[in-house]
Amino acid sequence: MSGIKVLVAGASIAGPALAHWLRRRGAEVTVVERAPGLRPGGQAVDARGVSKEVIRRMGLEEVVRAACTDTAGAHTVDADGTVLETYRAEDDGGDGYIADVEILRGDLSQVLYDDTRDGVEYVFGDRIAELAQDADGVDVTFAGGDRRRFDLVVGADGLHSALRGMVFGPRERFLRHLGLVLAFYSVPNEFGVDRWMIDHQDRETGRSAGLRPLKDATHAMAMLSFPAADFTVDHRDVEAQKNLLRERMAGLGWWTPRILAHLDDTPDFYLDQVAQVVMDRWSHGRVGLIGDAAFSSSPMSGGGTGLALVGAYLLAGELAAADWDPEAGFAGYEARMRSFVEANQEIGRLHVHSLLPQAEPGQEPEEEPDMEAFTALIQRAINGAELPDYAGLPDAGVREPAQP
């Protein structure tokens, strides 16, 4: 064991994934999560390209695939339900629009927690209230009153990262709203959704409504989006979010009214702006950031989970390779991740742009995209991070996941 003590804030995906690799490299890891437990359900997330290799190296490929949604593909439909386009999970070697490794965020979080909980300390229902760092460590005061000292602290606490605000400055400095708002929640499967996702987009208004299958066939996941030049609703004010969604989605046809009818009885409503986090640096002294807290690419990139998994592998590896020197370790992590992050963020921006209302009549049409450059960008977003084998570093090896 290195004796290095690391505190990770956030127990969704990036946090437990980082805990896995930090533990394997010999660190003593504590994960603090403000929620009272793991959050179930949530949006379907994908692993493509190099992120699937990280899952394999974690020893979790079999258990992750067993927990996948088993989505066969997606149909885009018009207001009458007529199929316009079809995408299949096996397209592009499983790395296409619908990935062959697609899993609910909450299910992946559970897999990662079960994998790490026997070798990692988890503290639920608490959060970092204050921290002060010096040349040798970080003193942390928790909201529950506990005070502890760590060698390193890493924020994996999402788009609205409280740790980022404490150490790096106000969220407005780093958050880039992309002009779209996204909501999703589970609904009774009165629509006959099976293994195929269904998506309806209104090009004139830039709004969309869709349904995706769940393993529990009695329910489906609703997905709704609408354009918004700004977004001022508090991300914790659920009633205000529901009212906004009803207002902005009014008049959209297809099955939208039936989907909205379940707003008040769903157990897992989520709505937030589609936004990215753009920072010049992801570390300050002994405090670093990972996942959406550092480099959110937005859900529209399809690459956020891949960034979290790859980032976890590289951050733990680079810190261990630097003998836990924060300056060198964080610098190596940033150098290896930056191009990969930028490619995924560009994909996210382009996807949002394609969904927003088209140009007004009389305006100059946009230039046709350079498809060769676009294809190269997609490849960089999927496979654009090199994964060193970190031969010679401590590796405690793969553990059998704990039984739920």
Image (cartoon, rainbow, N blue to C red):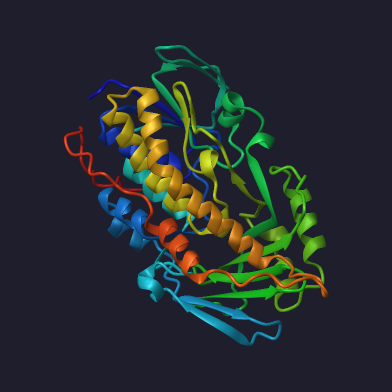
The quarter of the picture where the N terminus appears is top left
Vertical arrangement, residue 176 with respect to residue 62, above or below: above
* Residue 266 % position (x, y): 65, 59
Q: Looking at the picture, does residue 22 appear above or below residue 244?
A: above
Frontmost residue, 177 versus 112: 177
Image quadrant where residue 69 sits: bottom left
In the image shown, does 149 or 343 lie closer to the viewer? 343
Q: Position of residue 204 (x, y in %)?
A: 76, 73
Q: Residue at x 34, y 22 (%)?
A: 325
Q: Residue at x 77, y 53 (%)?
A: 229
Q: Nearer the viewer, residue 49 or 129?
A: 49
Q: Position of residue 303 (x, y in %)?
A: 48, 55
Residue 118 visible to an observer of this rendering: no
Q: Is residue 139 left or right of residue 396?
A: right
Q: Nearer the viewer, residue 7 or 299?
A: 299
Please state if 160 lies on the left or on the right of 226 as rendered. left
Please name the residue shown 21% across and 36% down the image: 395
The correct choice, above or below, for 23 with respect to 193 in the image is above
Is residue 234 toward the left or the right of residue 376 in the image?
A: right
Residue 130 image point, x, y percent: 57, 19
